[in-house]
Amino acid sequence: MSRDIIFETAIDIALNAGYLIETGEIEVDDSRLLVQRIRLWAEEFEKKSRTDDYIDYIDDVDRFACYVLKSNYPRSQKAFD
């Protein structure tokens, strides 16, 4: 698996993270830890889920990113105040 593929997947996950942060769906306290996790998640995704079909890839990586981000960075109660 090439570094370029991991890099592309990491960017896709990061874009999802930015969207979820902006919309208040996740809350991140330590952005450096998030960056480290994104790299690891990109590697995990590529080992388990990579498809050669671009449309399926986008759907799959978005679904994966949403799951891992929401699982690891839930909204706090103050987001509902």
Image (cartoon, rainbow, N blue to C red):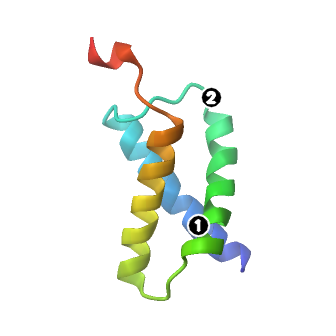
Q: Residue at x 44, y 51 (%)?
A: 67
The type of residue carrying mark 2 is Asp
Q: Is residue 78 above or below residue 24?
A: above
Mark 1 or mark 2, which is nearer the start of the sequence?
Answer: 2
Q: Residue at x 37, y 16 (%)?
A: 77
Q: Secondary structure at mark 1?
A: helix
Q: Position of residue 79 (x, y in %)?
A: 33, 19
In the drawing, does residue 2 fall left or right of residue 29? right
Q: Which residue is mark 1?
A: 45
Number of numbered labels in the structure image: 2
* Badge 2 density bin: few <14, some 14–19, many ≥20, Cα 10 Å: few
Q: Which corner quadrant of the image does residue 56 belong to?
A: bottom left
Q: Distance of mark 2 from mark 1, alpha carbons?
A: 22 Å
* Badge 1 density bin: few <14, some 14–19, many ≥20, Cα 10 Å: some
Q: Position of residue 27 (x, y in %)?
A: 46, 29
Quadrant housing the C terminus: top left
The type of residue carrying mark 1 is Phe
Q: Position of residue 58 (x, y in %)?
A: 40, 72
Q: Is residue 81 above or below residue 42?
A: above
Q: Is label 2 in contact with label 1 (beta carbons under 8 Å)?
A: no
Q: Which residue is mark 2?
A: 30
In the drawing, does residue 13 fall left or right of residue 32? left
Q: Is residue 44 above or below residue 25?
A: below
Q: Residue at x 56, y 66 (%)?
A: 9
Quadrant housing the N terminus: bottom right
Q: Position of residue 49 (x, y in %)?
A: 54, 74
Label number found at residue 7: none
